Amino acid sequence: MINRLQRLFHIQEENSTIRTEFVAGLTSFMTVAYIIAVNGAILSTTGMPYEAATIVTVICSFVGCMLMALWANSPLIIVPGMGDNAFFVFTLVFSLGLTWQQALAAVFLAGVVFMLTTVTKGADYLSRSIPKSMIHAMTAGIGLFIAFLGLKNGGIIVASEGTFVTLAKFSDPYALTTILTLLIVLPLFMRNVKGSFLIAIIAGTCIGALLGIVDFSTLRDFSLSFNGYGDLFFALDFSGMGKLNFWTAVFSLSMVIIFQNMGAQLGMLPNKSKFRKSFQANSISVISAGLLGCSPTTTAAESATGIAQGGRTGLTSLTTGLLFIPALFLIPLFKIIPNSAIAPLLIIVGCLMVLSVKEIPFGDFTEAFPAYLMMAIMPLSFSIANGIAFGFIAYPILKLVTGRRQEVSLTMYVIAFFFLLYFILGSI
């Protein structure tokens, strides 16, 4: 068995050991397991059954990690992404008006586009055509959006007739639970404590129970049923293909998943020669997510924790993937977790994504203003797609009026045209 693992994953060639890879896989799982609770809760806001959405989260995480392990021999892990599930819910469904079934079809087609870029020179062409400032602004803008979502779901930011939004009273049990949980997770996270996010979810649930916001009735039944999952499996609906908003969804989602995963993988892979196959595994996982009934999967930032523990091969991602299987039997336990226990994680993940703002050249206004516009519009319009559209329209305009049109690729002009068309037709 040991020799077979050595041969399959080339562990010695990567200067690693089986024990190191197992520990790295366990570490990655501990830091990313919170997605089981979070993703199901977010997807259920579209009308998806919560238990089914949680089941498909586990299935897609398992499939993604297996693809990364067995196809790419990479230590990166793939799970449904935090930014991607927000895009799925709040842009594809709530903003563009797709049903969740049509949104799944958009995920599938975006995955096909993603895959085409990985098996051709498309990824290289896009990486040269799209300004780096736009890519970093997309990441930072989604981070602001996720942070706002966490503050809202955690009850810290509430609606106000006079000022649209305002700060909640800290006597509110939901806001208080969020704040106390955030105070617990921050020092743990800063000290790189393994499983800090899981610890925060447990602590937040306990605090919420003490403050009376946790419903324990779901713990009466721990039986696992896949009956509801039938509503998600192959539920994708292509009936919206004749409408512009459907193709806007496919296009914008393709842009987001391609560039965020390209940046994540190139930034974390210890062995960059594995990038092409890792990128291909990621694209196939997105296609499978659309078929299985889930929001897009992504290269998890938490992969870095396993790599930091010495993970260098696919045995790391294989270990992580296998650990998702027993999590299926704990779904009733996840149901009792209040939004206030999850909100601090969204706030922290949002901050991590916003950090990419430091890569934007703010000394050049033609680069800074489109990026700033993109980041401002996303949370304020509660739409990631609107923010991306504003940024991509503003970029070529500023370059043109300042006599620097040679700095804009033909691809950028085409993208800007379609986003402008999206706004024009959307207002009719």
Image (cartoon, rainbow, N blue to C red):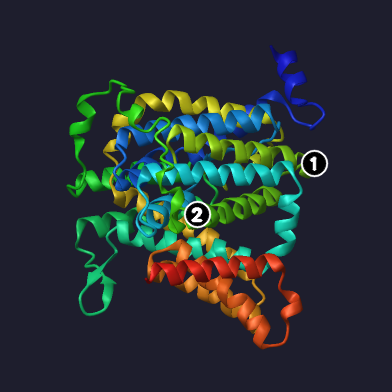
Q: Pick whichever, 51 or 151, lies toward us.
A: 51
Q: Which mark is residue 273?
A: 1
Residue placed at 60% from the left, 36% from the top? Answer: 284
Estimate the x, y position of residue 157 in percent, counting from the top left: 29, 66
Give the residue at the far top of this rendering: 1
Q: Is residue 338 above or below residue 4?
A: below
Q: Quadrant of residue 55?
A: top left
Give the residue at the far bottom of this rendering: 402
Q: Nearer the viewer, mark 1 or mark 2?
A: 2
Reading the image, the residue beneath label 2 is: 247
Q: Is residue 428 left or right of residue 121?
A: left
Q: Which badge, 1 or 2, is on the more N-terminal residue?
A: 2
Q: CA distance from mark 1 to mark 2?
A: 34 Å
Count of numbered tags: 2
The amino acid beneath tag 2 is Trp
- Label 1: which secondary element: helix
Observer able to see residue 194: no
Q: Is residue 143 above or below residue 58?
A: below
Residue placed at 55% from the left, 47% from the top? Answer: 110
Quadrant the N terminus occupies: top right
Q: Which mark is residue 20?
A: none
- Assess disc 1: are there few (<14), some (14-19) or many (≥20) residues with their C-alpha within 10 Å of its C-alpha: few
Observer able to see residue 145: yes
Estimate the x, y position of residue 361 in percent, counting from the top left: 67, 76
- Label 2: which secondary element: helix
The amino acid beneath tag 1 is Ser
